[in-house]
Amino acid sequence: MRGSLRPVFPGLHGVATRLALALVVGSVVWALTRDGLGAALLLTPALVLQQHWLWQPLSYAFIEQSPMGVIFGALILWQLGGSLERSWGSRRMVLFAVGTTVLAGILTVLLAWVVPGALLLTSFSGGWVMGSALWVAYGLSFGRSQTNFWGLPVSGNVLALIGVGFVFLSGAFASFLYVVPSAIGLLLTWVYVRLGGPSDWMLRLQGWRLQRQMRSRSKRLKLVSPDRNTPRDSDRYLH
């Protein structure tokens, strides 16, 4: 599985390619309609809470507001997302990428509601929220094993830290307010990779319930004494 995570070009037919294409299309639509429809596609907590524009935690995931953000975001979704797709499978990769970004957006809205202020009126794009989540998940999947960053040999954990560093630098040079969804997305990524997702938790719960059932049933079993006067061919005590 480690070998399948090598960052090779995934081709043009995977789900990761569709995510990258959706980011490009969504960003272009926003750029062409930023004074109208485009403004409704970004995540603005005040509009979600007051106008009930509930689609924004999803629509913002496929928008970046700068050409470099679109290009590098699409490359990350295509290449690193494609590597995770080969390792995890298409369904799991898409659920992680989109689900983490949407949940980060929802938690950002809830945070703005609990702590009202500038966060309430800030508009967010989510292309890099999804891209940084895939970046860090890709690095954590390697762990201490070696991968590379632009040709430099690094461990997976170091690669994940580099992804976190990009988010930190974005906040330091602009405003940490703008990277709140990304920071939440990185926290969710760490929880998912280290502790497992909902399906893993359901399996653990089912395993725990099965163990309890087996223990409760074992208490009702009775041991048949070997000196009992019962013919060998009798099936009376088989159950």
Image: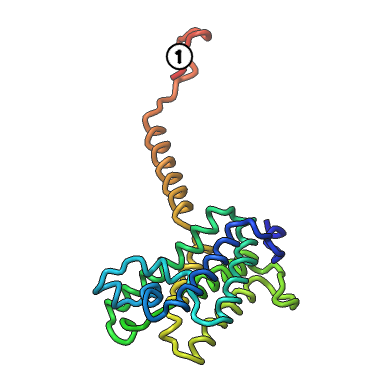
Residue 106, located in which quarter of the rendered image?
bottom left
Q: Is residue 185 left or right of residue 76?
A: left
The number of callouts visible is 1
Q: Is residue 64 left or right of residue 150?
A: left
Q: Is residue 198 left or right of residue 45?
A: right
Q: Is residue 81 above or below residue 218?
A: below
Q: Is residue 232 above or below residue 18?
A: above
Where does the image place residue 148, in percent across and percent down from the top left?
72, 73
Which residue occupies 72% across, 77% down?
150
Residue 51, located in which quarter of the rendered image?
bottom left
Q: Nearer the viewer, residue 58 or 115?
A: 58
Residue 56 shows in this picture = yes
Q: Nearer the viewer, residue 43 or 83?
A: 43
Where does the image place residue 72, in percent across and percent down from the top left?
60, 76
Where does the image place residue 10, in percent across and percent down from the top left?
68, 61
Which residue occupies 46% across, 20% down?
225
Q: Is residue 116 above or below residue 10?
A: below
Say which residue label 1 marks. 228
Q: Is residue 120 left or right of residue 134?
A: left
Which residue occupies 74% across, 78% down?
152
Crowding at dot 1, Cα within 10 Å, few <14 / some 14-19 / many 20+, comes out as few
Q: Name which residue type carries label 1.
A: Arg
Which quarter of the rendering shows the N terminus? bottom right
**What's the image's color scheme?**
rainbow
Assign a secondary structure to mark 1: loop
